[in-house]
Image: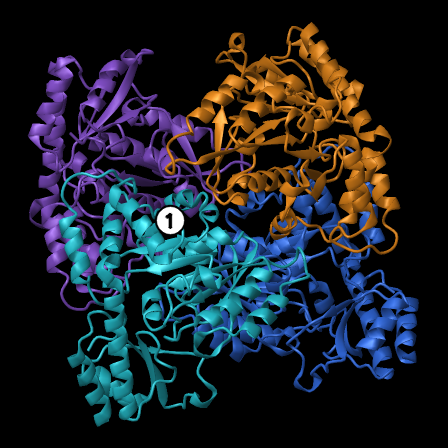
Chain colours: A orange, B blue, C purple, D cyan
Amino acid sequence: MNFASDNTAGIAPEILQALVSGNDGFALGYGNDDVTREVERRIGEIFEHDVAIFLVPTGTAANALALAHVSPPWGAVFAHSEAHILTDECGAPEFFGGGLKLVGMPGVGCKIAPETLASTISHYLGHTPHQVVPAAFSCAQASEAGTIYRPGEIVALTKIAHAHGMKVHMDGARFTNALVRMNASPADVTWKAGVDVLSFGATKGGALAAEAVVFFDRAEARNMAERRKRAGHLLSKHRFLSLQFKSFLADDCWLRLARHANAMADRLASGLAAAGRPPVWPVEANLVFIVLPRAVETHLKTAGARYYVRNSESLPDQSVLGPDQCLIRLVASFATREEEVDHFVRLVAKT
Amino acid sequence: MNFASDNTAGIAPEILQALVSGNDGFALGYGNDDVTREVERRIGEIFEHDVAIFLVPTGTAANALALAHVSPPWGAVFAHSEAHILTDECGAPEFFGGGLKLVGMPGVGCKIAPETLASTISHYLGHTPHQVVPAAFSCAQASEAGTIYRPGEIVALTKIAHAHGMKVHMDGARFTNALVRMNASPADVTWKAGVDVLSFGATKGGALAAEAVVFFDRAEARNMAERRKRAGHLLSKHRFLSLQFKSFLADDCWLRLARHANAMADRLASGLAAAGRPPVWPVEANLVFIVLPRAVETHLKTAGARYYVRNSESLPDQSVLGPDQCLIRLVASFATREEEVDHFVRLVAKT
Amino acid sequence: MNFASDNTAGIAPEILQALVSGNDGFALGYGNDDVTREVERRIGEIFEHDVAIFLVPTGTAANALALAHVSPPWGAVFAHSEAHILTDECGAPEFFGGGLKLVGMPGVGCKIAPETLASTISHYLGHTPHQVVPAAFSCAQASEAGTIYRPGEIVALTKIAHAHGMKVHMDGARFTNALVRMNASPADVTWKAGVDVLSFGATKGGALAAEAVVFFDRAEARNMAERRKRAGHLLSKHRFLSLQFKSFLADDCWLRLARHANAMADRLASGLAAAGRPPVWPVEANLVFIVLPRAVETHLKTAGARYYVRNSESLPDQSVLGPDQCLIRLVASFATREEEVDHFVRLVAKT
Amino acid sequence: MNFASDNTAGIAPEILQALVSGNDGFALGYGNDDVTREVERRIGEIFEHDVAIFLVPTGTAANALALAHVSPPWGAVFAHSEAHILTDECGAPEFFGGGLKLVGMPGVGCKIAPETLASTISHYLGHTPHQVVPAAFSCAQASEAGTIYRPGEIVALTKIAHAHGMKVHMDGARFTNALVRMNASPADVTWKAGVDVLSFGATKGGALAAEAVVFFDRAEARNMAERRKRAGHLLSKHRFLSLQFKSFLADDCWLRLARHANAMADRLASGLAAAGRPPVWPVEANLVFIVLPRAVETHLKTAGARYYVRNSESLPDQSVLGPDQCLIRLVASFATREEEVDHFVRLVAKT
């Protein structure tokens, strides 16, 4: 019953197999190999657009490199107050970005409403040069609450950002989980909707450690190779990063793995709802959040369930936590099995 | 005949197997797993000292994180002019170190003589606060020329550094190659000789991507966890970094792999010497440098040999390159086979 | 009727005279002169404590240098959301601090309540190493709203900060204005109350451009000389910085100038209150904020009054701005004359 | 007999008078005043070109802000090994530039020969992305040795730099001293010769603390206002910076002061040459370097002469220092008097 995170799982079999099969022989290091070129082509194909990609081993690196590349040191990057880049990266965007400023915004379910973005930006206009300059908007797809932005919602946000000359970054650590939930193509929810640069995650989806920074305008990627290198994120045996992506993206593997994770989240959600513990936010990706009495929570932990207790100021209005309650986050992954889900649901139901 | 680099090889079978075997089940991310703790213990055992370790995926990250941790932004880090940190990391130490300054020093065979270190440091004293402050000395073991520092040589250098309140960093991307050549223990060539922090490399030795920053004084590692995290170098599925190190260090695997690489370098060196192309520097690790007429070099490339042509200002006095000559670097790895070596030597001999 | 800022005034006569008188002859540059040493002694005397001081030309420099010195790059610095360091320094603390994070907190009248500080810090504990680390608390004395912290209030805050191993910085751009309002000594409101480092401003008080970073523990100032130098803030003709401070601090000049500024603010406040426009916050330093109908505001501008319209989320609960209202800030300085004040009050009264 | 530096002098009377006269009344802060606009126009007039200017209080700030603006963090900035930016700014360019790399080059008399620049740049090509990228060339005019670049020499260097897409910065802390020595206009030795950005110094020339970063292409100055602000270098009472420049540039004051300083250097040089101590480099600005026996040097110090003993590796071949010799630097300023010069020359002659 391990629902702690999608990164507590191991490597998906298809990807592990690719590492094994691709291990023979010699290959030039630092991305000068055929597999890397193939992955770039493949990602371009998937997004139906010419792209420049930069593979790195962590999501924090992908996010921080991307943000530093689209914001000057005196830039403001607007994102949800509970976004991973604000709360879980120990200041990586500020470090990579030479001291840029992250500006947190509120929003139910960790999603930003267009009017919130517009009004927050407005506080950063007209006080030149005393204030940082609006440079980028970053949204997480799926969000940290497991909610997703539909194409129209993304368009509404990116239009505001672009109107102020800002760039748009999408933190897609769980991009595939969001994608497979929608009747939309990868292109529809990224560049066609105004996204300039995407952190396209494979790690949580089943890879060992592989994320791609995807630029939809090759010109904007200029010197990103140097930026990645000086951050220590250019792997010497780079082919193994590429092999992970190649196998992840082959034969719909990425979509299949994400659909499974989402299905397990759905199963959790419906089971828990039936047990009187409905999710606090719509379950749109592979995350389920429920409110529990603390006593129940203790009982679950004791029974061997693994998950994190979280704080959030993004709860819907009707879901304020009582003093004896807590919010728990349950994450399903490609490796989550139905039995675990059912076992957990039964445990909760019995309390 | 691939002698381009030790990172053109794949993953050593023992290490790949460990990734496969260790893939089952769930494990907490970010290093909060049992294998990681085991690796820390094991590295302490090998070095006969309490250590704090930080695993990262690249050597550039290991070096830059280590240097930033022992030098303030206004610090000077002294190293050989042709050290990897100066020439091949695109300014990573300067970036991680908030703008610290690398000071290059000359030295035959990419080794620093004690008197060179002492006199260079002396130029950075007495002009406070207009000049950067001597903060660290960094030496590569083995060096970029494939030479090694004997314990006594290290002691002579670290004494000078410590006398000025400086810390000593060792870039051990090829630490094991140096170690197995000497009649000395890991402790003898590190902390017992005055080394404060070591970049202990496994990647070139046979791992996928795994390096350890090893602090011999746990107190000096304070907040290194935050530094690594905000650099994007804390892997979420961290156990796979640890599994690489665990298997690398099990059953003398690391020593065996390095001995093989060194033996192949020796075989190259003696064959080439017999063919009238002796190495320009003593072959003490897994690197062989020879001088060739450009025409010969072209011929070898055409015949399928892979290696890099290099420049160096660290040649012995008698080895000045003529206008029609070039210096080539041949690197042996755990994966280099005798047949390749012999084939290459025959090719050279025939020219 | 210039109430735009205390920096729209020129140089106080006493200070200008000191520049003229001190101009003769030669003096070693970079602070190696007698006047500089004298100023350090004098500041120590005023604060009844051994101090290390660093003179710089701007308040932004003083604040950013001080904060960077007490916080590591992965540190969180807690301050009021409308503090100058968050809103008016274009990211200087983040730049100087290698990407440190400023955490804004709410508080009526731009003051932080102890419970707000405690609860905000608590959100930055226990999630190591994913989150930045509580490093410093910064309070402005007087605050941006013109309110002041009494000694007991400072103690309550600094105790919380110190209990978490944090340092305390005081932004004293208007330190003297706060000081003269209280029945307390400079020591009482700084180190005796737990302040570790003070930005002690003279510019707004009447100098040309002179601020002092004052460390109350000399050991904590280690290498601040290098930090200031590499920030370009070590003036070569440093004696002219020192002459400003020397004359500012001689013969109670600083106190007299601040008392005048405060008295003019009081006169404004009482006049405006009598005219039905009472200050929104207690007038404790040299700033007066009132709410005006927009039409009135336009009229005042036309009549030649100079001031800034501000936004604030720190208004007392009863003072919410209506859609046709605005908040204006009036700043008095050593150069403000009674006639101007009275003229302005009459203008307002007539509307 | 103070020849320690041109910054040991005070403020030139014309400039001090301007501070006094300009002190009346109120003026908007931060450069939004009339004098500042006037100075920008005046500098444009002097250089016969549209310019964007940024006034700051120190030369280190001017240099570091300029270099950071024309080089990315992964850029290499090429300059003479003994340039002020390499040896006397405690890493300011690296700090402001996010860890950019300064590459030192040799050259007699602290001047760079075109072939040296070309060959040094060539070592930074073709090793992407492992190496920093050639971004800028910086030359000092006058140089740290007191030598100057003639227009043709500047053209030869800037052509090489521009051919590699690099920008050219000129450190003009002693720009006027160089200018008045040549039969050339300010335009001839800057933008017409290929200089992109100039640190135009007034401090050493007679100001209190005033330097201008001058961009000859306004587009390249974009966001420099934010960069200056976040470095703490935007003075609030900015008019006093502008008043210094206004008076410095009025009525040929700047040229007159520099001509005097140069004349005093010439007088020193000819007197010392007559006394058997000829300058080691041509005296082209206001600096004179001579070689003295250490015993003589001690005698001069004792007799009250003030100057610095320097090291240099830029001596002409015939001028190697013997073990009992030292190199001393004598700096003349607007405040140097003939009597002092003659007194010093007599002292030397007598030894």
Query: What's under tag 1, amino acid-wise?
Result: His
Q: What residue is at 81 percent from the left and 74 percent from the top?
A: B266
Front-most of residues B329 and A183: A183
Asked if D36 appears above or below B253 in the picture, the reply is above
Q: Position of residue D257 (x, y in %)?
A: 23, 67
Asked if B43 appears above or below A79 in the picture, the reply is below
Q: What residue is at 42 percent from the left and 46 percent from the top?
A: D224
Residue A16 appears in the picture as rendered:
yes
Q: Position of residue A167 (x, y in %)?
A: 57, 33
In the rendered structure, the residue with mark 1 lies on which chain?
C
Q: Which residue is mark 1?
A: C69
- SS category of the residue bearing label 1: helix
Q: Say whether residue C253 is left or right of residue C89.
A: left
Q: Quadrant of the C terminus of chain A?
A: top right
Q: Position of residue B332 (x, y in %)?
A: 80, 66
Q: What residue is at 77 percent from the left and 61 percent from the top?
A: B6
Q: Quadrant of the N terminus of chain A?
A: top right
Q: Residues within 10 Å of mark 1 (few under 14, many from 20)?
A: some
